[in-house]
Amino acid sequence: MRLVLVGPPGAGKGTQAARLADTYGIPAISTGDIFRANVKGETELGREAQGYMSRGALVPDEVTNAMVRDRLLHEDVAAGFLLDGYPRNPDQAVELDGMLADNGTALNAVVEITADSDEVTTRLLKRAEIEGRADDTEDVIRKRLAVYAESTAPVTAYYEGQGLLVRVDGIGEVDEVTDRLVDALRAR
Ligand code: ADP
């Protein structure tokens, strides 16, 4: 199972990614988590990414694409993977298609978790109190939502054109949303 999860910041991608990965026995690969781990570990990659992340901007494609290409060479993706947070613009989507074609594979489905921006802003501000993530301030959240609308939303159209897109409502209890996701994927 090779899946991509798309959705606005705060839609619950991370939570649902972990559950889907568990259900299908595949690794969840979050580009945001990889970047954060590198910032924390003060690596070269972390130093490159940090400024963009703290502003809520996308890390440049060359950096992100190379990181994902490298991650997809690991042995644990043989049975599949779930990408969370990548691709985040149409150029990354084209790049991912190329990486998979090079391996003779392709995506099975792209799941979009939908949630309106008032709901996600409320969730992110609440998360800021609990987790203290550096980019969960009101200004940066607004910027991340704007980047989503401008750069990432077109990615769903790209996959819709390929007949891969599955849309799932992200509003409701966590379990309820997981059930919707699994049902929607089974129905394909
Ligand atoms: P969220 O979806 O809640 O905004 P993520 O954890 O997915 O958070 O990403 C956090 C930050 O990491 C992004 O705002 C961006 O700076 C960087 N990032 C993550 N994935 C990508 C990507 N595919 N391309 C460019 N930058 C990325």
Image (cartoon, rainbow, N blue to C red):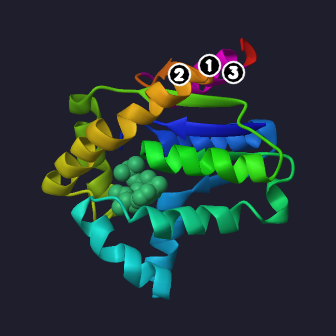
Mark 1 or mark 3: name the one nearer the start of the chain.
1
* Magenta span dominant secondary structure: helix
Callouts 1 and 3 close, C-beta under 8 Å: no
Q: Quadrant of the N terminus?
A: top right
Report the side of 48 relative to 34 (left or right): left
SS class of the residue under badge 2?
helix
- The residue at 71%/43% (across/down) is 21
* Residue under numbered circle 3: 185
Residue at mark 2 to residue at mark 1: CA–CA distance: 5 Å
Q: Which residue is mark 1?
A: 163
Q: Does residue 162 appear left or right of residue 36 in this picture?
A: right
Residue at mark 2 to residue at mark 3: CA–CA distance: 15 Å
Estimate how packed mark 3 is, as few (under 14), some (14 to 19) or many (20 or more) residues with alpha carbons within 10 Å: some
Confirm whether the magenta stretch covers residue 117: no
Q: Which residues are magenta?
A: 172-185
Q: Position of residue 115 (x, y in %)?
A: 35, 27
Mark 2 near mark 1, Cβ–Cβ under 8 Å?
A: yes
Between discs 2 and 3, the one toward the N terminus: 2
The picture places residue 5, in percent across and down from the top left corner, at 55, 38
Residue 112 vs 52, above or below: the answer is above
- Residue receiving disc 2: 160
At 67% across and 38% down in the image, what residue appears? 3
Helix, strand or loop at label 1? It is: loop
Decide which of 20, 97 is in the foreground and name it: 97
Task: Identify which residue, 98 or 7, lies in the foreground.
Answer: 98
Q: Secondary structure at mark 3?
A: helix
